[in-house]
Amino acid sequence: MKESACREERGPTNLVVESLAFSEIPGQSKLFLDYQSDPNSLSTFYPNVVSSITTLLNHAAEVLRNYPDHRGDVCDVLLQQNRRFGASQKTLENIERLRQGDCVAVLTGQQAGILGGPLYTVHKALTVIKAAEELTKNGTPAVPIFWAATEDHDFAEIAEAFNIDASGRLVDLVIKGDPQNESKPVGSIVISYDDAEAIAEHLESLSSTEFTDSTKEMFRDCWKAGSTYGLAFCSFIAKIFASYGLIVVDPMSPKLKEISAPLIVSAINEQKTTAVSLLQRDAELLTAGYHSQVVIDQESVPLFWINDAGERRALKATHDGQFRINGEREMISSEWLIEKVAAEPERFSPGVMLRPVVQDYLFPTICYFGGGAEIAYFAQNSEVYRVLGRPSTPIFHRQSFTIVEAKHGRTLNKFELEFKDLFQGFDALLPLIIERFINPSAAESFAETEETINSELGKLAAELNKIDPTLAANLATRQRKIAYHIAALQKKFHRVQGERDETVDRQLRTAFAELFPRSGLQERSVGLATYFGRHGNYCIDWLYEAIDLNDKGHRIIYL
């Protein structure tokens, strides 16, 4: 299905948008696909499931009724943080709107990736912006909030970035990081001079356009030596969505930790019940035919401890009701932990199973927009909500996009390809294109030769079988060898023909590099710098205009 979306500012007056069902995209989990097709059928795992933004309006009263009275304190933190991030006036106004007792929040979040991470970070942010506007328009005041996952301590997960260079190749940036920072929350790690230099050098690979210099400057200004990766990411998000009023939250704030302390105490007191409930839910998911989500055992505690070195260490429970910090042998009591929550709440960091509950304790969250994996997590951690006495939050899949620029659109049209044909892979698709468009006569000769050989050998086999069946069997073996050698020759023909026709080879390779990089969707690898460098910040507006909250498919935008 194709449709048009308004396109503002530069370029043609409209975009052509095509929707592709996720069931046609390889690598999707069964739970995610079932949730997309019929979320109401999974109400056992998603107690407050809501099928659309329209029906979500009825959920606002429950959210406001269950929200603790700490709006003022939370908004004070948001105001301070967003001013530090260089927020726009519209963002500051949205924070003031959130102070009002009838305002709800639409949340999403993402790790603090270098150069903003993959494109789906942008897709998440734009989705919550659009959803908040739709809710407000329909009588439920709402603001968009982006939770920067600065507390995560796996630096390797955020230390890689991809861009498309001037020649159309996918280029990779990997920041190795200091081993001494290995277990520290990424948001607290300071960007070294060498890391800033590596990032700046990576940006030199961008195509040269009228927007290239400003794009490089914007990214360098955020990821500069002496700043932290958390501040760089939050400032970047605040900057590119300034005109949309997106509120950014850094959860490492000591004040936010203090506000969420009662929930942390409950998580400590209910550790055993939580672990048992999560194990039971995991079993239920397996029985229903779904895969396990987050691995849980009886010792699991949905909390981390920040030690004196600033390292984030998992807490573990023992069989006798004690606790220990991962990597340490000393046993500690729940009473000791609870005392620490009161005295030093900044020492505690929620894990993936508790994080959504903390988010929805801090904010009047009417819904969360996440990716397929986050949707799967919610099927499990709805039990954490239940055990801790909090209503679970409805979750929707974020908008999902592939941007097809004109040159790649022409390549697809030239070879009569649809976007989903790329899922076959380059090695499978190139021979088909050669045989259909580049050298169909040779391909026809191979087919005719194979057919002739099979026909003649079939006749010979019939005659031999009359004389001695073992001769026919021997011929069958030789026939298979002949077929193998012809196939090998045909494969070599494809390779040589592809190399001779450099234009076709280049067009197809660059299309794969940008549209289906690393055998996955574009949004999971390519970063925003590629499109900012080519089109400026107009690409943010184009993506926003292409959003359709009622479309649960992957949206392909043809520029």
Image (spheres, grey):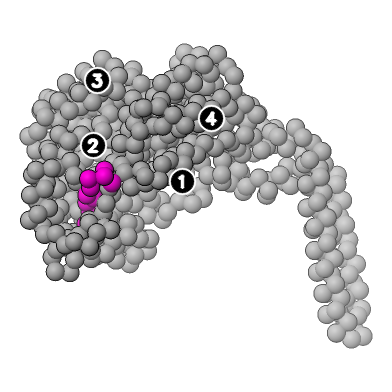
Q: Residues within 10 Å of mark 3 (few under 14, many from 20)?
A: some
> With respect to residue 344, does 218 lie above or below?
above
What's the distance in space between the residues labelled 2 and 3, CA to CA?
16 Å
Which disc number belongs to residue 22?
1
Decide if residue 308 is on the left or right side of residue 108: left
Q: Residues within 10 Å of mark 4 (few under 14, many from 20)?
A: some
Secondary element at image label 1: helix
> With respect to residue 171, does 329 lie above or below?
below
Between 9 and 356, the one nearer to me in the picture: 356
| Residue at 73%, 42% in the rendered image | 433
Which disc number belongs to residue 83?
3
Q: Amino acid at mark 1?
A: Phe
Mark 1 in CB contact with mark 3 (< 8 angstroms):
no
Q: Earlier in the sequence, mark 1 or mark 2?
A: 1
What's the distance in space between the residues labelled 4 and 3, CA to CA?
29 Å
Q: Which residue is mark 2?
A: 252
Q: Amino acid at mark 2?
A: Met
Instruction: Please check the rendered image and state whether residue 204 is part of the magenta-colored stretch, yes or no.
Output: no
- Quadrant of res 537: top left
Q: Residues within 10 Å of mark 2 (few under 14, many from 20)?
A: many
Q: Amino acid at mark 3?
A: Arg
Q: Which residue is mark 4?
A: 202
Secondary element at image label 4: helix
| Residue at 35%, 21% in the rendered image | 239
Q: Earlier in the sequence, mark 2 or mark 3?
A: 3
| Residue at 83%, 62% in the rendered image | 485
Magenta segment? 301-311
Q: Position of residue 345 (x, y in %)?
A: 14, 42
Residue 107: tell me if it is visible: yes
> With respect to residue 474, does 37 lie above or below?
above
Between 363 and 142, the one nearer to me in the picture: 363
